[in-house]
Amino acid sequence: MTIISRRLLIAGAVCGAALTTACNNGLGGNGAAEIEARVDESLRYLFSTYPATSELRDKSAGMLVMPLMSEAGFGLGGAYGRGALRVGGTTVDYYSATEASFGIQIGAQQYAHVLFFMTDEALANFRNSPGWVAGADMQYAVLNDAQNFSTDSTVFGAPVVAVVFGQAGFIAGVTLEGTKYNRIIP
């Protein structure tokens, strides 16, 4: 790697980190109480705005709620957020989510997402991993023309269903593949 490309990599990482921090993703907050309040509000919004997602909740073994993800990029990008894993409506652990990206991108945005673990095995795999990375075993429930989430039979057959909502800002699209989730102590 040449010195120029190292400098470019470092500069891009610093810009991405600065933009992400500027989005106020809850770093340095009140820990668990702040995460819980944001999780509760995000779930209220999700289930009242998109009632079809209640069926996902009812059929899932557990759900990871990331109420505020902050993403920024200028060539190099990144995203960060904190949330809670709920099983049976009760928080059992707290997690951070981090993502790095490279490509044609510029801007910043915030969004929320929920991972619904549709099987006990998927939930156990997530909880027992030292750092779980979202990948190909995940299905997205997406908005259709009526601004409702589509939850067809293929969605319910997936071990993990991701719902992304509440986007604000300017970066085209959101994907969770490659996002790494780690257990934290807030």
Image: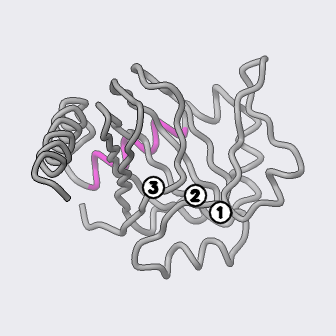
In the figure, 170 relative to 185: above or below? above
In the depicted structure, whether residue 68 falls above or below residue 62: above
Q: Which residues are magenta?
A: 32-43
Query: To which residue does mark 2 refer?
Result: 63
Find numbered disc 2 in the image and state the secondary structure of the residue it sits on.
Answer: strand
x, y percentage for residue 96? 34, 58
- Tag 1 secondary structure: strand
Contact between labelled residues 1 and 2, with CB atoms less than 8 Å apart: yes
Q: Measure how far apart labels 1 and 3 are at the Cα level.
A: 16 Å
Residue at 54% over, 43% down? 175
Residue name at image x 43 percent, y 25 percent = 171
User: Which one is in front in this view, the residue at disc 1 or the one at disc 3?
Assistant: 3
Q: Which residue is under mark 1?
A: 117
Q: Is residue 1 left or right of residue 173?
A: left
In this figure, which residue is indicated by the disc labeled 3?
A: 179
Compared with 100, 125 (above or below) is below
Q: Quadrant of residue 59?
A: bottom right
Is residue 13 rendered to the left or right of residue 48?
left
As measured in the structure, the alpha-carbon distance from the residue carrying label 3 to the one carrying label 2 is: 16 Å
Tell me the residue at 52%/48% (across/down): 176
